Image (cartoon, rainbow, N blue to C red):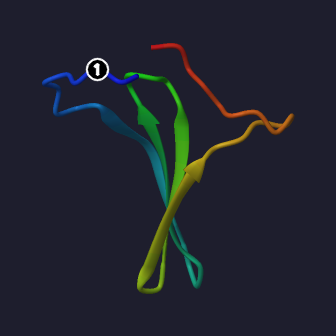
Amino acid sequence: MFTKKNDNNRFLVKSTENVPTLGKFSVVVDQQTGVHYLQSWVGAGSSITPLLDDNGKVVIEKP
């Protein structure tokens, strides 16, 4: 399904925001698939999930 590329820059951090009392949030783009992810760091934990548009579909930017 995935082909291995010798590319160290597959993921691009598109934006980052520090929200006081909540944590740090970043939008990360997979440059091979175009899928956008929301990554968060809250306290000692972190998570990542696909970013959804207004219709609930995954945000994809054609590479």
Q: Residue at x 47, y 45 (%)?
A: 15
Q: Residue at x 58, y 85 (%)?
A: 21
Q: Residue furthest front?
A: 1
Q: Position of residue 41 (x, y in %)?
A: 46, 71
Q: Which quadrant of the figure has residue 31?
A: top left
Q: Position of residue 16 (x, y in %)?
A: 46, 54
Q: Residue at x 59, y 79 (%)?
A: 22
Screen quadrant of the N terminus: top left
> Which amino acid does the dot numbered 1 rest on?
Thr
Q: Position of residue 5 (x, y in %)?
A: 19, 22
Instruction: State the count of labels.
Output: 1
Disc 1: which residue: 3
Q: Residue furthest top?
A: 62
Screen quadrant of the C terminus: top left
Q: Residue at x 65, y 31 (%)?
A: 59
Q: Using the image, determine if residue 50 lies above or below residue 31.
A: below
Task: State the SS at label 1.
Answer: loop
Q: Position of residue 49 (x, y in %)?
A: 58, 53
